[in-house]
Amino acid sequence: MALVTMNFESEYLYSNHEISIILPDKPRSLTAKEFYSSGKKYKVLWLLHGTFGDHSDWLRKSNIELYACEKDLIVVMPSALNSNYSDWPDYMIGYKMFSYLTEELMPLVYNWFPASDKREDNFIAGLSMGGGGAIKYAVNYPEKFAAAAILSSAPRNLHKIDPKDTDPKNKRQQVSIRNAGGYDNYVNSYENSWDKLAELAPTGKLPKLYFACGKNDFLYDMFREFRAYAEEIELAATFEEIEGFTHEWRFWDLTIQHALTFFGLDQEDEAGNPF
């Protein structure tokens, strides 16, 4: 595959920002002129990292480049700090990660690379914090994605949060509430995937949804709570629980393969060169 590492000044992140993009490779059966002037548009996977990660995580710790090659798929991997894929207006001079992906990164990729902007050709996935980001984008912009994969993560019932909680272990939750302008604003914002899913479940407007979690993962109880809720609201979604896995890259490398199959991305006979 062709790999692009791109650094540019972001309007929404107020700083230089680095992304990685996997692009389809030229099959050896085609000439350079035939391949690069074809005008073909490719399907796109927007792939999100977890806490403490960056744009390089999936490349360094999984085989995503191989899987993308087999399926002739563009994969876009941004960096998000530890932002929860949220807008943080009070972070330094501003850091609007939630808005950045749809308002800046998507236009950049669609117009500078051979990427299809059709809903049926766009998919989003992420692990842990990135899984939380993936479901937020899926429920707030269901018109942009055909399917979403949420790995080692699940929506939380924000109505159960204690807004007066000062436990240091929940610092990010406290900062998120403060960042939103208070608890009521937080619960009534784009952050509330829990309620948005109940609202959209009967409409048929949601992307196809795949949730996966290891049974030894520290987030497994949260995953099970959400799965029960999904049954209650009759959410059309696929759930996978796998024995023997914790919060780990072996699990994410396995389940991103399952996600690509779930998305309907079959191996392409005319794809690039996987060796």
Image: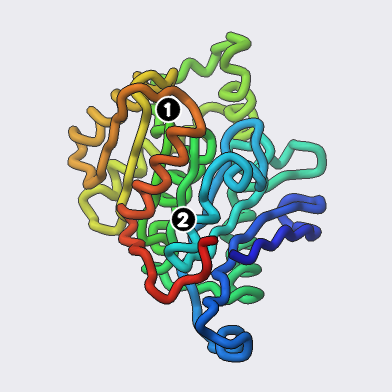
Count all numbered tags in the image, as a single digit: 2
Q: What is the crowding at mark 1: few (fewer than 14 residues within 10 Å), some, or many (at least 20)?
A: some
The x, y position of residue 143, in whole percent, is 40, 63
Q: Nearer the viewer, residue 258 or 269?
A: 269
Q: Nearer the viewer, residue 57 or 8?
A: 57
The x, y position of residue 55, in whole percent, is 66, 47
Nearer-N-terminus badge (2/1) = 2
Q: Amino acid at mark 1?
A: Leu
Q: Quadrant of the N terminus?
A: bottom right
Element marked by disc 2: helix
Q: Is residue 131 left or right of residue 107?
A: left
Q: Residue at x 42, y 51 (%)?
A: 138
Q: Is residue 176 above or below residue 274?
A: above
Image quarter of residue 28: bottom right
Q: Amino acid at mark 2?
A: Tyr
Q: Which residue is mark 2?
A: 67
The x, y position of residue 245, in whole percent, is 40, 25
Q: Is residue 92 above or below residue 170?
A: below
Element marked by disc 1: helix
Q: Residue 98 — which label?
A: none
Q: Which residue is mark 1?
A: 158
Q: Is residue 189 visible?
A: no
Q: What is the crowding at mark 2: few (fewer than 14 residues within 10 Å), some, or many (at least 20)?
A: some
Q: Is residue 70 visible?
A: yes
Q: Quadrant of the C terminus?
A: bottom right
Q: Nearer the viewer, residue 199 or 274?
A: 274
